[in-house]
Image: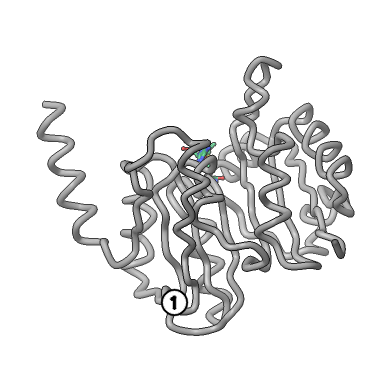
Amino acid sequence: MRIRRKKHLEERLSLVNNYVLVADRDIPNVNEAIKDKKYFDFVSLFGNENPVEIEIGCGKGGFIVQKALNNPNVNYFAVELLSNIIVMAAENAKEKKLSNVKFFNSSAEYLPRYIPNNSINNLYLNFSPPFPPTSYESHRLTCDRRIVEYKKYLKTGGCVYQKTDDKPFFEYSFDKFVENGFEVYDVSNKIDNGEIENVVTEYEKKFRDKGMPIYALIAIKKED
Ligand SMILES: C[S@@+](CC[C@H](N)C(=O)[O-])C[C@H]1O[C@@H](n2cnc3c(N)ncnc32)[C@H](O)[C@@H]1O
């Protein structure tokens, strides 16, 4: 049963291979892998020089596909760890015939190998796992190491937009962005009252349907 399900996944992935890039598995050790740079050339990848925005942990891709539909002059690059999830996101983009979105099947930890410095205009973290135990802090997508990397990818003035349902994780992330030199704003109320345009993600819809509060921040990369 398991083999059949995997074969089915491979067939589905092969049908969206124009949309999905896969991280190399040649160097399994992440610290070694990130020294061996294999930077993407976004201009040749998308066939134009439009701004590039990244989402890390895109899940089924509802957010990034809607962003790509709303902003045809922006290129979207969505990263997701799980191949059985990313395939759904890519099928959605293919169905909508989008040419301004690509998916990357990788863990965030490997991104320094692929994302050139100063190449990204904005970065989105939507409902990333909070990993509450302190011993799991290094897995959080807003731990110091990840934020230092985001700062390198982003152009000056570029923003990280983060949303979460988890208040302690929100507060932790807010503090981490401040400590790493970003200018940070709590925009939770502004997305609720429509002052800031908000594209609702799959997880966000579930939480909003239950009446749960959503926490949102914008962290701006200041001049180096
Ligand atoms: C809770 S889901 C949220 C999905 C989507 N962003 C949303 O808001 O509906 C978190 C997603 O992040 C992915 N993820 C978690 N850690 C990751 C990492 N280190 N690198 C890439 N993706 C990751 C998970 O596989 C999962 O699909």
Q: Where residue 163 appears, x then y in whole percent?
A: 70, 45
Q: Who's the residue at 55% across and 49% down the image?
A: 56
Q: Where residue 202 appears, x then y in whole percent?
A: 52, 46
Q: Is residue 210 left or right of residue 192?
A: left
The quarter of the rendered structure image containing the C terminus is bottom right
Vertical placement of 58 versus 144: above or below? below
How many numbered marks does the figure carry? 1
Q: Where residue 166 appears, x then y in whole percent?
A: 71, 31
- Which sits in the foreground, 20 or 86? 20
Q: Who's the residue at 38% across and 35% down the image?
A: 28
Q: Who's the residue at 47% across and 65% down the image?
A: 40
The quarter of the rendered structure image containing the N terminus is top left
Vertical placement of 205 versus 157: above or below? above
Secondary-structure class at tag 1: helix
Pointer 1: what residue?
46
Callout 1 crowding tier (Cα within 10 Å): few <14, some 14–19, many ≥20: some
Q: Which quadrant of the view contains residue 205?
A: top right
Q: Is residue 184 left or right of residue 57?
A: right
Q: Which quadrant of the view contains residue 102?
A: bottom left
- Which sits in the foreground, 158 or 65? 158
